Amino acid sequence: MAAASHEARFNLMLTDMRHFLIQGEIRMPLLRSAHRLLVGDITNRVPSDVYRELVDMIFAQRSPIVIISAVVVVCGSMIYLHDNSSVGLAATLVATVLGVLRLLHLAWYNRGGTTRRSFEEVRRCDLVFATMSALFGASIGVISATAILTPEPSTRMLGYGLCLGYGTGLVSRSGFRAHTTKASLIFMLIPAMTAMLVISLPGTAVAGTSADFGVIALIAVFVVGGFLTATEMERVTIEHLVTRRNYFKLARRDPLTGVSNRLALQDGYEKAIAEPGLVIVHCLDLDRFKPVNDRYGHSAGDRLLREVAVRLQALLGDRDLLARVGGDEFIVLQCSGSEASEVNALSSKMVAAISRPFAIGSEAVSIGLSIGSARAMPGDDLDAVCAQADHALYQAKASGRGRAILARQVA
């Protein structure tokens, strides 16, 4: 019975590990604890796109990892030549391997750009990076500890310098990820501070001098300052990224209806045309909108435009885009269709949706919608496709309004 229970727990652990490695899901209590320790709750505190940018920033730092890895190899080798410690040598080898693995991880993450990476994959990469950073810090702590426990003052100073150099460099280059930075510092400080405590005790084989105690006090001050600096750096960085994100969205939104504007339409078109699949540009113009605006006033006209945007947006797929480009003119970028029937179906749904009455105060107001559409081909400019769709729109209005005409037939 006990064996079956252990086997069930082991199988559950393997399942949780598979979900983490493949999908980025963190289910196992051990993994959840590691994530809280090394990464913190930042994924719950910031928008997903801001979190993604923070991870991209930390994966862009190749040169500092190369430099600190080289420094650790040199310092670890020098310390080993003085004390012949197998522990220090093992820690140096571990740090060297971790340095290479971190560089390979950075290269893998940055291959082909990072925009296509899923949120779960970004989250998983962040945890792997934080784990290797903490282990690298622990290796440096062990190397420093072996140096501090030697009777040679110059070797001890090398250990202190390695602690200070790594700590200050870590805060300066990745302090904007405060939790990961603090975790790496703590993993480094545990063995190093243990060695410092040993030499400060009376009666030990290696007794510390006043210079040792002065350096230890300086390191303690640097640690406190590093923790405070990392916390402030993260706060300022997140505020900056969130503000930039908000301004970026405002610059691409129509202030009246909240849908995309022409700038966002251009960006969306360039991304859509670069992907395989059908891309249709629908130019929409409201019929009989001007009489409603003249009779009920501009505020009523604005409410009507907002309601039109809501109805149109409800018909679109996740990959489609709705933009307001003029007073009562909209453009729909359809990327979710794959054949002519889907294109015609969306056009018919949009005409039917806008033909239903709108409530203006206590009155029901009816307007209409005319649509001209054109298929975008690879290499087509947005303005050129819109010109074709506009021509089809003119034909739709001339033939009686409330119609949809496609300039380029879809196979």
Image: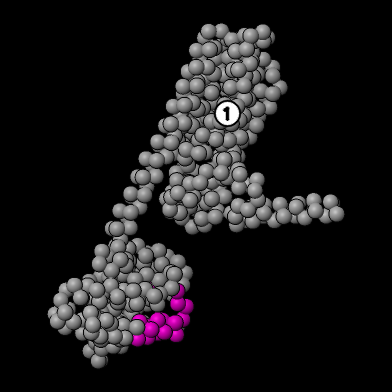
Please determine whether, in this image, residue 215 is positioned above or below residue 339: above
The image position of residue 91, as x and y in percent, is 65, 27
Kindly report the secondary structure that dominates the magenta region of the rendered protein: helix
The image position of residue 250, as x and y in percent, is 29, 58
Q: Is residue 101 left or right of residue 245?
A: right
Magenta stretch: residue 403 in it?
no
* Local secondary structure at mark 1: helix
The image position of residue 411, as x and y in percent, is 45, 83
Asked whether residue 139 appears in the rendered view, the answer is yes
Tell me the residue at 50%/35% (across/down). 181
Asked whether residue 151 appears in the rendered view, the answer is no
- Camera-side residue of 174 and 71: 174
Displayed quadrant of residue 257: bottom left
Please determine whether, in this image, residue 186 is positioned above or below residue 22: above
Q: Is residue 297 left or right of residue 284?
A: left
Tell me the residue at 28%/88% (across/down). 402
The image position of residue 171, as x and y in percent, is 46, 32
Count residues near mark 1 (Cα–Cα under 10 Å), then give few for <14, some for 14-19, many for 20+.
many
Q: Is residue 184 left or right of residue 377?
A: right
- Camera-side residue of 330 and 218: 218
Tell me the residue at 34%/71% (across/down). 322
Tell me the residue at 25%/64% (across/down). 255
Tell me the residue that label 1 is attached to. Answer: 188
Q: Residue furthest left?
A: 294
* Magenta highlight range: 333-352
Q: Residue furthest front?
A: 362
Q: Amino acid at mark 1?
A: Met
Displayed quadrant of residue 336: bottom left
Displayed quadrant of residue 93: top right
Q: Is residue 204 left or right of residue 287?
A: right
Please determine whether, in this image, residue 85 is positioned above or below residue 305: above
Q: Quadrant of the N terminus?
A: bottom right
